[in-house]
Structure formats: structure tokens, C-alpha cells
Amino acid sequence: MIDLVVYGDFNCPFSALASERVDELERRGIATVEWRAVEHDRGIPAAGVEISGDVAQMLTDELAQIRGLLDRGEPDRLQLPIRQVNTRLAITRYAGAPNESRPELRHEIFASHWQRAERIDDAVVLDDLGAGPANNVAAEEWRAAWQAATDPIVPVLVLPDGYVSRGLGALARLAGLLA
């Protein structure tokens, strides 16, 4: 079993695919993964942005690209959300969850946003998902480590030897571990 670190943002569809692959790696006993949630785009306002126009087209294109990256047997679960959310609250609440609860919570936050169009920037939704109390210190530590490791892109995969793989390369490496 190998130990991996993955950085991803809940509003990024590429991170959502990385999360699905991480779920499968852990389910098969291939790897243990420390998922560190980071806010990739701090420019998204606290209220989020309705998805329309250029944002809708960008996300539609990204979802089409992701569908092209799916390996045989990988489910196509991602749907265009209603809003592009500011993920700061979801990240700090995820960081406050007990370590043993994080894999399921990560899965549920991604599913909530990308499959059920729920507001993961809403404290009540996060409560219902089992998120912990906000832990700003851990979230900022994750962000600092992510920024020190690479250009600000998600997902990022850190291998046991410290090698950093980012973006589509990270997704390909995760898929390769499942092959």
C-alpha cells in the first residue's frame, strides 16, 4: 500500500474525478490518501456565481474533457452545477472533520455539488453532510503546502518520494495506479 497526498478543490470537476479515483484506490487497498482541500479560485465571491454564459460554457467544456478521460468502467456522474461556489467554508469545515471521517465527507461534498446541485457553501448543508467545525489553521497549512509544491492548479498528486504531479498528469497517474 502506498501513501499519497492529493490537493483538490470541491468546485473543480477535475478534482471531482481525482476524488472518484482516490475512492477506488482506497476501496481496493492500493493506497491511503490524505486529501487536502484547497481553494483554487479565491476570486469567486462569497455568494457564488450563477452558472451561465462563459462560465457555463467553460464548465461544459471541462465536463466533456473529463468524459474523454474516463477509463472503462469509471462512472460518468458529474453534472453541470447551478452555481459556481466559493468553497472556503466547505474547505474549513472539511478540515475540521476527524481524519477517519474525511474520505466519506470528501465524497459527499463532491457528490452534493456535482451530482445533486446542493449548496456546499451553506452551513446547514455541510452540517447534514457531517462536516466538522471550521479549522482555518489546517486549511491554511494545506494551502501553503500546495502553493509551495507547485503552480496553483488542481488536482495535485504528491507521490511517496515527493514527486509532484499536477492537473491532467495527476489524473493520469491516479488512473495508472488503478490499471
Image (spheres, rainbow, N blue to C red):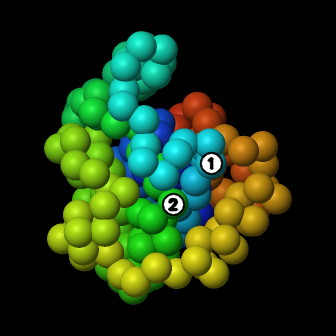
* Residue 2 visible in the current orientation: no
Q: Is residue 174 left or right of residue 166?
A: left
Relative side of 35 to 144, left or right = left
Three-letter amino acid code at the position of disc 2: Arg
Rendered residue at 34%/36% (across/down): 83
Image point 40% across, 83% down: which residue?
133
Query: Gap between marks 1 and 2, in whole Å?
Result: 8 Å
Among all residues in the image, which is located at the extreme right?
148
Q: Residues within 10 Å of mark 2 (few under 14, many from 20)?
A: many
Residue assigned mark 1:
42
Marks 1,2: beta carbons within 8 A:
yes
Above or below, 76 against 141 in this view is above
Up the image or down, 124 lies above or below 179; here it is below
Specify the label residue 88 is tagged with. 2
Q: Residue 59, how many percent across, how many down?
A: 42, 23
* Three-letter code for the amino acid on which mark 1 is drawn: Arg
The x and y percentages for residue 46 are 48, 52
Q: Is residue 98 among the parts visible in the rendering?
A: yes
